[in-house]
Structures are given as C-alpha cells and as structure tokens.
Amino acid sequence: MEKRITVAIDAMGGDNAPFEIVKGAVDATKELEVNIKLVGPQEVIEAELQKYTYDEAHIQVIHASEVIGTDESPTMAIRKKKDSSMVVGLNLVKNGDADGFVSAGSTGALLTGALFIIGRIEGVERPALATCLPTKDGFTFLVDSGANVDCKAKYLEQFAKMGAVYVENVFGIQNPTVALVNIGSEKEKGNALTKEAYDLLEATDLNFIGNVEPRDIPSAGPNVTVCDGFVGNIILKLSEGITMTLLKIIKKEITVGVYKIAAAMLKTPFRNIKKHFDADEVGGAPFIGLNALVVKAHGSSNAKAVKNAIRQCVSFSEADIVGKIRDKI
C-alpha cells in the first residue's frame, strides 16, 4: 500500500473555527486517501469530533493551548506563542510529521511562520502566495497575490517558474501560458520593474506570451498571471468585490415582479455561474517556494473549502512539487 499523505490543520484558524474546520477534515478523510492532524485545544476539538462518524485511524488531535488572533503582530505572535495551533502545526511539517499545513487564520502570521519554521527551497529568493482567479474558460493562477509587496524582476521570473510548475503538475495543464501584468500589452509599456521582468521571462523556456492588461485577465487570461504582491492583492480584492456586487445586482433585478418566473427557470444556470466564482471550490491559496506546502484558506472558509484545501495538499505531495520547483529554479 502507498503511504497516505498526512495534512496538519489549524483547527482554530478562521471565522468558523473549530466547527467548519473539523467538519471539513472529517469530510476529507471520507473522500481522500489522507490522514489528518487537527491542531488546537484537545477538549474543544474532541467535542466537535463527537458530532461525526469517521474512521479514527485517520484523524489525530494534536493539543495546542494558544491561538494567534488576526489583530496580533505576525512576527511577535509567531515568536511568543510557541504553543499556538499555527506554530505547532507548522512544526509538525518541519519535523516530518505532516506533509502539508492548512490554516484559515491570520495571513501575516501564517506567511511569517512558514518562512521562519519551514523555510524556503534552496535557490528561491521569495516564496509567493498564489490564487486561482476565475476566467471565462476556467481560471488563471495569480502569482504573487499578496506575500511580497516590493519585488525585484528576478522574483517575478521565479514566481512565473514556480507557478508554471504548480499549474502543470497539480492542475494537469501542459506547457501553461504565462503572462506579466502590465498597463499595456506592448513590450515597451510599464515601469522599470515590469520592463526588466519582461526581458527575463522572454529569455526563459516558459511559454511566455507577453504582457496582459488586468481587464483582459477574466476574458482571455493566461494559465499563470505574474505580478508583484501589491498589484496582485489589489487585483484579487477588486475581483472579489466586483463579483459579489454583480451577483447581488443580478439577484435583485431578476427577482422583481414578472421576472420572478424567469428567475425560477434560470435557477440552475445561475447556480452554475455562482459555483464558477466560488472560492470554496479551490480551497485556498498555496504559499509556493517553501520546503513543504502551506495553504492559506479564506478567513470565512466553510467545511467545503477546508476539504478542498486538504485536496490541494494531497495533489501537491503526490506530484512532488517541491522537487520539481527545486529542479526548475
């Protein structure tokens, strides 16, 4: 028998902890070949587990007495709260007791802790946070979406290489297209950073297709979209805001008066549209470039999102993404 992948979960991270986190972990063990280590106050987690029927051989509770809040200084919290669910979980990965880690807790603390505890792959100058953004025909893998707000051109080149490795091996897209976010499609456009990054990307063996303007990402987005974390986070948050607002406007307009009949007939198509833009389908944003996978789940993650974040860890480990990124870099 093949060895099961082991994923550590921050059971106390996020708005819906621990109930949605625990439920997602239980659901994952029923659908995936995975072992789970739920990290947090033992009594609290075990009380949640009593609500479900599951194979106890595949879920273990690891006690941690502290929780890092979203309002705490990331660096100070990681240094002082050694027995927090986040730090204990990251150390499980560092010590080889887990293959990956998932948390819906503080983004800053998670990124800081991951760098301090798990560390970078040799040769990687800056690990990056990557997010799947929906497009007309699927998604684009946005790298970096918030980990590095100040970047050098060399970082962007590495983001592109790591993103391409991830998309090809986790999502099965062969020779993925890669584009650089810019204010125009022409090579000469942009600031000093994007111009230098363009030259570096053009010289790689990646399937680099040039610049992409943000407005073109949803309609004809490349498989991998590269930018610094400042630009990427703005793209991500603006996209989320526009999507939520647009869905609310559509719902309001089609449920008024005579349109209610049409709305009933279009229930299935609208459900499919909502699913297409549902972040829970992906599960979370991987922090790539580390010696193991760390997934940042959304703060409001439900059980479905947690389960799919665990699925990412399984696919990542089975595809040996760390080894492939190491070879690429």
Image (cartoon, grey):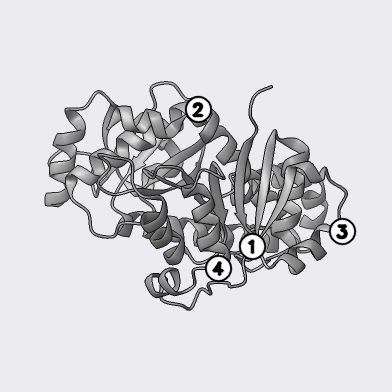
Nearer to the camera, 78 or 70: 78
Where is residue 188 drawn, in percent x and y?
A: 12, 41
Look at 31% across and 59% down and name the residue there.
230
Q: Tell me the quadrant of the picture where the N terminus can be found.
A: top right
Looking at this rendering, what residue extends furthest in the front direction?
Answer: 95
Q: CA distance from mark 2 to mark 3?
A: 34 Å
In this rendering, would 272 be left or right of 133?
Answer: right
Q: Which residue is mark 1?
A: 248
Q: CA distance from mark 3 to mark 1?
A: 34 Å
Q: Position of residue 214 (x, y in %)?
A: 35, 48
Q: Earlier in the sequence, mark 2 or mark 1?
A: 1
Q: Is label 2 or label 1 in front?
A: 2
Q: Which mark is residue 51?
A: 3
The residue wearing badge 2 is: 319
Secondary-structure class at tag 4: loop
Image spot of residue 304 (x, y percent): 70, 50
Three-letter amino acid code at disc 1? Answer: Lys
Q: Which residue is mark 4?
A: 84
